[in-house]
């Protein structure tokens, strides 16, 4: 047939069979490669997603740790009078001409009391700064008013100091003061130890 002998036809048929088998092998191999690539991509996507999730968790933990560290620093750092607090204290001009600033026997409290005293002096207010006392150990900053001062004057001064972050909750009494020269008509700013936490709704004194 077509001038080809049987032997040649056998070779042609065999060659076509080999070619067909090779084509099928290529198709199968290509399919296997595609499947493997898809599997690799899926595995890669899963690894990337897992890595991103781990990174997000680590970042969240780091942020939480930094926040706790900042809170700890705030708790252990000494108080310092801020420019904003000084601005609030300016409202005492014309309402107070002289007063006493004193503290409990505590180094941090004494330094903060001295800052307050110097700030008030800079405003033209006469300030007496007696030695620290152990007569009463408290935390925060309190104002002890003269018994003779009316409630409107008390309220005005207390509001100013509260806005300056210096008026702690409580009922300070003149019995907190040590025996000595404390005239009944003197206003006393009494600086206690630094509170561990600020009163609810109030900014901590810094």
Image (cartoon, rainbow, N blue to C red):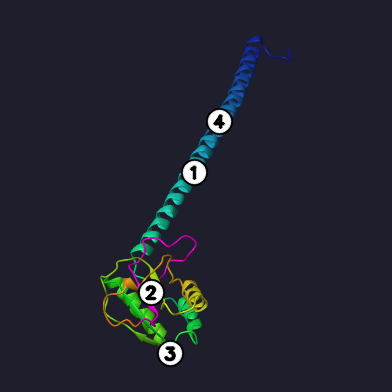
Q: Which label lies toward us, 1 or 3?
A: 3
Q: Position of residue 173 (x, y in %)?
A: 37, 71
Q: Earlier in the sequence, mark 4 or mark 1?
A: 4
The answer to which quarter of the image holds residue 148 is: bottom left
Residue with the mark numbered 2 = 80
Residue with the mark numbered 3 = 124
Query: CA separation, marks 3 and 4?
Result: 87 Å
Q: Which label lies toward us, 3 or 4?
A: 3
Query: CA separation, marks 2 and 1?
Result: 42 Å
Disc 2 packing (10 Å; few <14; some 14–19; many ≥20): some
Q: Earlier in the sequence, mark 4 or mark 2?
A: 4
Query: CA separation, marks 4 and 2?
Result: 70 Å
Q: Position of residue 62 (x, y in %)?
A: 42, 53
Q: Earlier in the sequence, mark 3 or mark 2?
A: 2
Q: Is residue 38 above or below residue 65?
A: above
Q: Which mark is residue 53?
A: 1
Q: Left of 126 or right of it: where is 13?
A: right
Q: What is the count of numbered marks?
A: 4
Q: Left of 175 or right of it: where is 22?
A: right
Q: Which mark is residue 78?
A: none
Query: CA separation, marks 4 and 1?
Result: 30 Å
Q: Position of residue 125 (x, y in %)?
A: 42, 87
Q: Is residue 203 above or below residue 52?
A: below
The answer to whether marks 1 and 3 mark residues whose Cβ atoms lie closer than 8 Å is no
Q: Earlier in the sequence, mark 1 or mark 3?
A: 1
Q: Main secondary structure of the magenta part?
A: loop
Residue at the right extreme, as displayed: 2
Residue with the mark numbered 4 = 33
> What range is drawn magenta here?
184-206
Viewer-nearest residue: 167 or 43: 167
């Amino acid at each position: 047939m077509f001038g080809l002998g049987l032997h040649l036809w056998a070779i042609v048929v065999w060659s076509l069979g080999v070619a067909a088998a090779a084509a099928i092998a290529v198709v199968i191999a290509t399919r296997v490669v595609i499947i493997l690539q898809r599997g690799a991509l899926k595995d890669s996507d899963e690894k990337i997603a897992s890595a991103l999730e781990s990174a997000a968790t680590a970042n969240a933990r780091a942020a939480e740790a930094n926040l706790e560290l900042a809170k700890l620093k705030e708790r252990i750092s000494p108080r310092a009078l801020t420019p904003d607090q000084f601005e609030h204290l300016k409202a005492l001009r014309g309402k107070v001409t002289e007063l006493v600033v004193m503290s409990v026997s505590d180094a941090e409290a004494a330094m903060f009391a001295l800052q307050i005293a110097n700030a008030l002096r800079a405003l033209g207010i006469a300030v007496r700064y007696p030695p620290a006392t152990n007569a009463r150990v408290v935390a925060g900053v309190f104002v002890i008013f003269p018994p003779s001062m009316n409630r409107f004057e008390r309220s005005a001064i207390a509001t100013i100091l509260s806005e300056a972050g210096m008026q702690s909750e409580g009922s300070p009494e003149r019995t907190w003061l040590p025996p000595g020269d404390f005239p009944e008509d003197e206003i006393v700013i009494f600086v206690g130890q630094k509170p561990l936490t600020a009163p609810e709704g109030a900014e901590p004194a810094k």
